[in-house]
Image (spheres, rainbow, N blue to C red):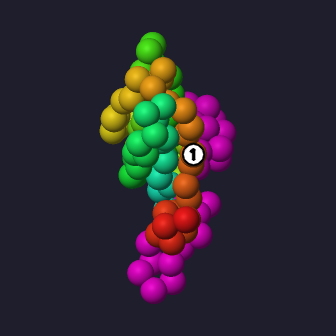
C-alpha cells in the first residue's frame, strides 16, 4: 500500500513551492486583479476582487477563485453577473494598475 501512496505524494503541490515573506513566514500571494467593464450605454463598472470570468448562458459571471489559481471550480465564489449583450468592452486590471487609477 505504501508503494502506491509514495508516487502520489511526490507529485502533490506544497506551500514549499511558493516564495515566502521572510518577515512573516507566510506564503506570498499574488494580488487579485480587478475587471473594468464598459457597457453599451457608456457606463463603466469595476468588478473588484474578481480573478476570472465565464459566460453562463446570457450572462457573464465574475468569480473569485482560490490562491493564485485562475481556474473556476466548485469552490469559486460568484461575485456578480452582467448581461453579456450589455458588455461593450471587458478589461482586466492588475492590482498595480487598479491602485494607480490608470
On screen, residue 39 versus residue 92, left or right, reads: left
Assess disc 1: are there few (<14), some (14-19) or many (≥20) residues with their C-alpha within 10 Å of its C-alpha: few
Q: Quadrant of residue 16?
A: bottom right
Residue at 49% x, 67% y: name it. Answer: 101
Q: Quadrant of residue 3?
A: top right
Residue at 45% x, 86% y: name it. Answer: 23
Residue 46 appears at what percent x and percent y? 41, 49
Residue with the most extreme top position: 57
Whether 22 is drawn above or below 47: the answer is: below
Residue 59 appears at what percent x and percent y? 42, 21
Residue at 47% x, 52% y: name it. Answer: 34
Residue with the most extreme bottom position: 23
* Res. 14 in view: no
Q: Which residue is mark 1?
A: 91
Q: Nearer the viewer, residue 84 or 27?
A: 84
Residue 24 appears at what percent x and percent y? 41, 81
Span highlighted in magenta in the image: 1-30
- Placement of the N terminus among the 4 image quadrants: top right
Residue at 61% x, 60% y: name it. Answer: 17
* Res. 40 in view: yes
3 falls in the magenta region: yes
Q: What count of labels does the image hold?
A: 1
Q: Secondary structure at mark 1?
A: strand
- Placement of the C terminus among the 4 image quadrants: bottom right
Q: Nearer the viewer, residue 14 or 27?
A: 27
Q: Nearer the viewer, residue 1 or 38?
A: 38
Amino acid at each position: 500500500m505504501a508503494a502506491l501512496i509514495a508516487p502520489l505524494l511526490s507529485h502533490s503541490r506544497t506551500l514549499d513551492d511558493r516564495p515566502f515573506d521572510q518577515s512573516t513566514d507566510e506564503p506570498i500571494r499574488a494580488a487579485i486583479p480587478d475587471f473594468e467593464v464598459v457597457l453599451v450605454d457608456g457606463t463603466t463598472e469595476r468588478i473588484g476582487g474578481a480573478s476570472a470570468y465565464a459566460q453562463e448562458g446570457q450572462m457573464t459571471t465574475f468569480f473569485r477563485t482560490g490562491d493564485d489559481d485562475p481556474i473556476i471550480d466548485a469552490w469559486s465564489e460568484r461575485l456578480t453577473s452582467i448581461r453579456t449583450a450589455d458588455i461593450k468592452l471587458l478589461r482586466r486590471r492588475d492590482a498595480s494598475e487598479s491602485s494607480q487609477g490608470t
